[in-house]
Amino acid sequence: MATMIQAIRLALHVGETRLGVTDIFGEDVGAPLGGVFTGTQGLETAWNTPLDERGIVGTAIGLALAGQRPVAEIQFCDYAFNTIDLLKLAGNTYWSSGGDWNVPMVLMTPVGAGIRGSIYHSHSFDATATRIPGWKIVMPSNPRDAYGLMLSAIVDPNPVMFLMPKALLRLKGKPSDLLPGEPEDDKQLASMIDAPLGDRSAWKPRWPDVQELYIPIGESRIARPGSRVTVLTYGRNVPMAVAAADELAAEGIDTEVLDLRSLHPYDWPAIAASVRKTNRVLCVNEDTEVTNFGEHLIRRIVEELFYELHAPPRLVAGAHLPGIGLADALEMASVPQKDGIKTAIRELAAHEP
Amino acid sequence: MSTSSRPTTHPVSVSAPPRLAAETCLQIYDLMLRARVLEERLITMYKQGDGFFWIGGPGEEAFNVPLGLLVDKGRGVDHDFLHLHYRSAATLLAMGADPVDALRQMKNVASDPYSKGRNFAGHFSVREWNIVPVTSPIEVQYSIAIGTARAQRKAKGITVVQGGDAGTAEGDFATCMVWASRKGAELPVLMIVTNNRYGISTPYAGQHGYEQISDRGKAFGIQTAVIDGNDPEASYAALKQAIAYVRNEKRPFLLEAMVSRLRGHSSASGANLVKDEIDCVARFEERLIERQILTRAEIDRRRETYTNELAEAAKHVRTEAQPTPESAFDYIFAERNLVGEDN
């Protein structure tokens, strides 16, 4: 089974060999490293940029305007904040030019906590990203979705931000989620596409004949069906919420976990259907809680589904702190953990109007 | 064209420019005059309430017209990409743009072809001619230009990027030099700085410790030149040489043109005539009269004709429809890859 980072690499391979991707680039993205998370190892069109995030985003915009298909990486989203005016430009160019120029670029960047990454390798970007109109924003929670969302991002004529939950990048998918054409033996896959340690100057990947699989942007997935409480989440918090829900099943609480997969556009019909079914909703994400994407979802749920609700909607999100501290206890106290999610679900389930 | 390292507080003529043929002079002058009259009309529209804001390039015509005449106009990587700024109307006119379209953008009517009533005057966008959208954030075009230039490493076209002197303090200017000059990965980009010696109200010396902006290019091994951008013949010669260098060598070139800012930064500072700056149109007129290419009477007649034409056009533009409120929601996401169809 491919890990999420292997699935991303396979999608980029499909992109550059079959879907017209011309440039995959960022800091340490090309040989010999192939990305600090190995996402771009062995790719033909991968190249190293100067250590300059504004240059990376600007180059991606320019390549896109010139009719190329760029996939750019910001090594950690923590370092994307100095590019926000360029991200705004990528998002508003089609609109401001009255439909003259579209900007077909993909920007991928690892996000979130969970690796004890301290203050500048733990940032979330979903609240910021959803504040930049004109972008499509996706965030997978498993290798298969990562593969299918990356392929959809590559062929989309608009700027697409691909947020990579860094705590999940090295986790393998379920056997039932094998990518089409992927070898069943994960050791075999690793021997084919993972660069060896040490000298890799003579190494070449042997790509499996993976087939195209498109996860449509804007379409959510029910990660765990349930009837009593709805959890709206994405990325790293999906497996966490599913685990919380599985444990609560023993207490007789049947929880539905909706993996949004796309933050913009987001799957409102699926959200509304789930809330109508359970009448209780919890939003979970890691970004800081003030002006949080979950707050937007709650606002819309309250406005449009108020009389469906049997309990006040809840948000479990990152604390509104200036940073995520390195020490174990500090990180755990700063972003949602399974126990906190369980407590919130339990309280929602028990609440009667 | 030669490089200069002497302190410059006023436009200088670095070397005696070669004389252009009378026909070329006339073509350049006519476009300079049309561009000047256009800017005057835009300012009048602003002052009459037919627009919310004016910004433009009176004082840059002698440089911007030759630029528009010398680029390889077209669509896709085999033609030149232009990353201009909001003082580039003369370049647009020299490339063949209809001045009435600039009035439409000023009046923010739905027929504004550059932004459909969404953006300020001078914020051009013409995909048909590789003119990428002009942005209000200063200097971002220098980071974006890297991308089009990279796409053109094996193409016939080059990338031209232009901005003012104050904006070079932004990191994007250094970004462009870093990325364009990497050994073995040099980019075909002509970096232009039109130096009017001001950033809104801040004088040149208030933000630059170096004598000329182009001196910074030398640290990157980039060819540089400083020219008198108030002289259309000097500008034409320098641009022709710089464009040929970038096209043939596939390497960057940094060209600094000393220009005037005849109406201040924008309407925010009144857009009134600044008296102590060289007026490139008036100066060129004197030269053309001296060479007996034009008479004062012919000049006056042309100016009057163009002024009347645009006054009439402005009246008509005033009657054109404003964008509807619903149209604010158009063009958020593209359904088709328009730019992918260009090559």
Image (tube, coloured by chain):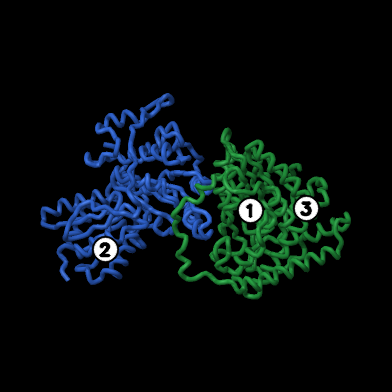
Badge 2 crowding class, 10 Å Cα cut-off, few under 14, some 14 to 19, many 20 or more, is: some
Chain holding disc 3: B
Residue type at mark 2 is Ala
Chain holding disc 2: A
Residue type at mark 1 is Gly
**Drawn colour of chain A?**
blue
- Residue located beneath label 3 in the image: B231
At 56% across and 72% down in the image, what residue appears? B321
Residue type at mark 3 is Asp
Q: Could you tell me how far apart the alpha carbons at marks 3 and 2 are, in whole angstroms?
A: 66 Å
* SS at mark 1 in the image: strand
Badge 3 crowding class, 10 Å Cα cut-off, few under 14, some 14 to 19, many 20 or more, is: many
- Residue located beneath label 2 in the image: A272
User: In the rendered picture of this protein, how many numbered marks are placed on residues?
Assistant: 3
Disc 3 and disc 2 on one polypeptide chain: no
* SS at mark 2 in the image: helix
User: In which quadrant is the N terminus of chain A drawn?
Assistant: top left
Q: Nearer the viewer, mark 2 or mark 1?
A: 2
Q: Output the letter for the chain in green.
A: B
* SS at mark 3 in the image: loop
Q: Could you tell me how far apart the alpha carbons at marks 2 and 1 are, in whole angstroms?
A: 49 Å
> Image quarter for residue B220?
top right
Badge 1 crowding class, 10 Å Cα cut-off, few under 14, some 14 to 19, many 20 or more, is: many
Chain holding disc 1: B
Disc 2 and disc 1 on one polypeptide chain: no
- Residue located beneath label 1 in the image: B163
